[in-house]
Amino acid sequence: MKAIALVVSAREHGNSYDFAQFVLDDYKNRGLETELINFFDHQITPCQRCEYECLQRLDPAKGVDGECPIHDDVRMIWEKTWRAEILLLFVPNYGGMLPALWEAFSQRSQAFFRQAPLEQLKKSVVSAVLIVSPHQSSGAAWALSCMADEVKGLDRKVVGFEVVNPPQFQAEYTFTPLINNEEIRRRLSFMAEKTRQVAATLQNQ
């Protein structure tokens, strides 16, 4: 099996990266093929400067969708996720909202999501880790709700949805790695193992 982790962070090596690397290291030790895709390293462009090419099938004058005019890394990343039995999402929040990088990545999929291998995805799984502090950000409840809906819309079996509230584990968490906390590592390990087990079961059906 292959596991892909998406690190949806504006920082190169923040907490989301550390969490993803921790889980993938465990999977690699168990013999799984792994890949970490760090959004920091890729061009993720929001929908812009278009004529709704992805909706032209609804235009009586055209009837067929056109090609998305934006050429960046979004489609390549989505296609990689389709080929993995395990998809892991590691998502921080900014100002109580989901990262703009995730919103752009998710929205851009409307140009090609109909080409996803649905039957294959039904035998694959997704788990997510959201880093958010509900008592500190007024919009945090929206971030939780929105990300839950995003995960359910990926056409995979949802296994884990872990919420890490940084102040619960240490006073300074922006620049002090949360991965050093034993309880966080325990929770990540539990989620990783459960996700792997469910994925293996689906593959054997």
Image (cartoon, helix red, strand yellow):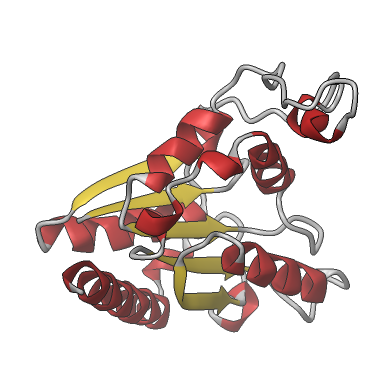
Q: Relative to 155, is 44 above or below?
A: above
Q: In what quadrant of the picture does the C terminus appear?
A: bottom left
Q: At 72% from the left edge and 43% from the top edge, which residue is drawn?
A: 107
Q: In what quadrant of the picture does the N terminus appear?
A: bottom left
Q: At 21% from the left edge and 63% from the top edge, which residue is drawn?
A: 26
Q: Position of residue 177 (x, y in %)?
A: 47, 60
Query: Foreground: 200 or 164?
Result: 200
Lateral position of residue 142 relative to residue 88, left or right: right
Lateral position of residue 114 relative to residue 17, left or right: right
Question: Could you say which quadrant of the image residue 148 lies in?
Answer: bottom right
Q: Relative to 91, is 182 above or below?
A: below
Q: Relative to 105, is 71 above or below?
A: above
Q: Relative to 50, is 131 above or below?
A: below
Query: Foreground: 41 or 33?
Result: 33
Residue 12 appears in the picture as rendered: no
Total marks shown come to 0
Question: Could you say which quadrant of the image residue 40 lies in?
Answer: top right
Query: Foreground: 97 or 153?
Result: 153
Residue 31 appears in the picture as rendered: yes
Q: At 28% from the left edge and 56% from the top edge, which residue is drawn?
A: 24
Lateral position of residue 37 relative to residue 164, left or right: left
Q: Position of residue 184 (x, y in %)?
A: 42, 77
Lateral position of residue 24 relative to residue 72, left or right: left
Query: Foreground: 119 or 110?
Result: 119
Q: At 50% from the left edge and 56% from the top edge, which residue is drawn?
A: 16
